[in-house]
Image: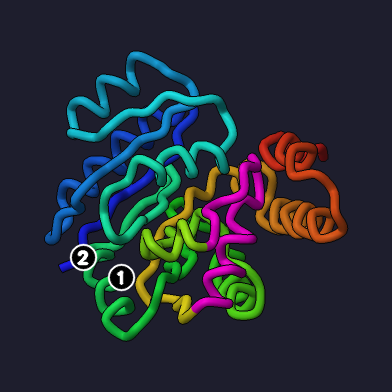
């Protein structure tokens, strides 16, 4: 059985982090190591990590660098990167293990919106699945990869946004990077707040700007901000 190291970047996500760590503890198969890379350094986060037996590492707020820092401390043979607001399916470890047994060097989970949902959700989920086949799945889809491959590629880029692009492209160049049928549930709060179509269009524009060479540091502020009406 593979030893999975879970790496979770966190920044003022204490309540959602606690829910995710509880889910990890309740899985039928246990992860080997949980690393929380905390860019806020709150005492509440420290207490949550202590409660659930996770290693807390404090660092500056930059998601790509947080992921790199966590990966440098990971000792498992498979690295599993989760956002703090992710919600898990019942048995994700088995799904990853089966993919690795098929010769995959890594992969990602199917994008599903968490509740509350609205009627555009299934349309957007299907569109995202299609995009991931030909483009890059993003970090909120629970990317996993063997530790050896991760370091061979050079890990995540040290960026606050689009930090996984070079990692996924490098993995696909080296071997099989498989999409899983198993879902991971994505927090829908930004879509609920900004409007399902407007938030999606906003995200696509950021991706286009990135492909045109705009700095991820500039784009990160736009991503996290509320979209103007």
Q: Are marks 2 and 1 in contact (CB under 8 Å)?
A: yes
The residue beneath circle 2 is 2
Q: Residue at x 36, y 56 (%)?
A: 80
The furthest residue to the front: 152
Q: Position of residue 111 (x, y in %)?
A: 49, 65
Q: Is residue 123 visible?
A: no
The image quadrant of residue 63 is: top right
The answer to which of 185 and 9 lies nearer the viewer is: 9
Rounded to the nearest whole Å, what is the CA distance between mark 2 and mark 1? 9 Å
Task: Give above or below for 124 relative to 200.
Answer: below
Is the residue marked by circle 1 packed among few (<14), some (14-19), or many (20+) residues within 10 Å?
many
The image shows a total of numbered marks equal to 2
Q: Position of residue 138 (x, y in %)?
A: 57, 59
The residue beneath circle 1 is 96
The answer to which of 188 and 116 lies nearer the viewer is: 188
Residue stretch rendered in magenta on the structure: 153-174
Q: Position of residue 87 (x, y in %)?
A: 36, 52
Q: Is residue 111 visible?
A: yes
- 126 in the magenta segment: no
Task: Give above or below for 29 relative to 220.
Answer: below
* SS at badge 1: helix
- 156 in the magenta segment: yes
Q: Position of residue 32 (x, y in %)?
A: 19, 51
Q: Residue at x 31, y 85 (%)?
A: 102
Q: How is the image coloured?
A: rainbow
Task: Give above or below for 139 relative to 146.
Answer: above
């Amino acid at each position: 059985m593979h030893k999975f190291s879970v790496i979770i970047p966190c920044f003022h996500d204490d309540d959602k982090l606690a829910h995710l760590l509880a889910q990890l503890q309740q899985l039928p198969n246990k992860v080997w190591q949980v690393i929380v890379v905390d860019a806020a350094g709150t005492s509440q986060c420290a207490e949550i990590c202590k409660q659930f037996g996770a290693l807390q590492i404090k660092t500056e707020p930059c998601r790509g660098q947080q992921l790199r820092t966590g990966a440098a401390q990971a000792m498992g043979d498979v690295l599993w990167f989760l956002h703090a607001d992710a919600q898990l399916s019942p048995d994700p470890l088995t799904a990853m293990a089966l993919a690795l047994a098929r010769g995959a060097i890594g992969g990602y989970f199917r994008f599903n919106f968490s509740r509350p949902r609205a009627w555009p959700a299934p349309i957007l989920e299907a569109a995202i699945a299609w995009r991931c086949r030909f483009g890059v799945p993003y970090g909120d889809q629970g990317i996993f990869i063997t530790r050896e491959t991760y370091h061979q590629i050079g890990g995540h880029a040290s960026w606050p946004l689009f930090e996984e692009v070079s990692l996924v492209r490098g993995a696909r160049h080296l071997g099989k990077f498989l999409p899983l049928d198993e879902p991971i549930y994505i927090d829908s709060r930004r879509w609920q707040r900004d409007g399902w179509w407007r938030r999606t269009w906003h995200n696509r524009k950021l991706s286009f700007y990135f492909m045109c060479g705009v700095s991820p540091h500039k784009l990160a502020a736009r991503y996290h901000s509320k979209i103007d009406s």
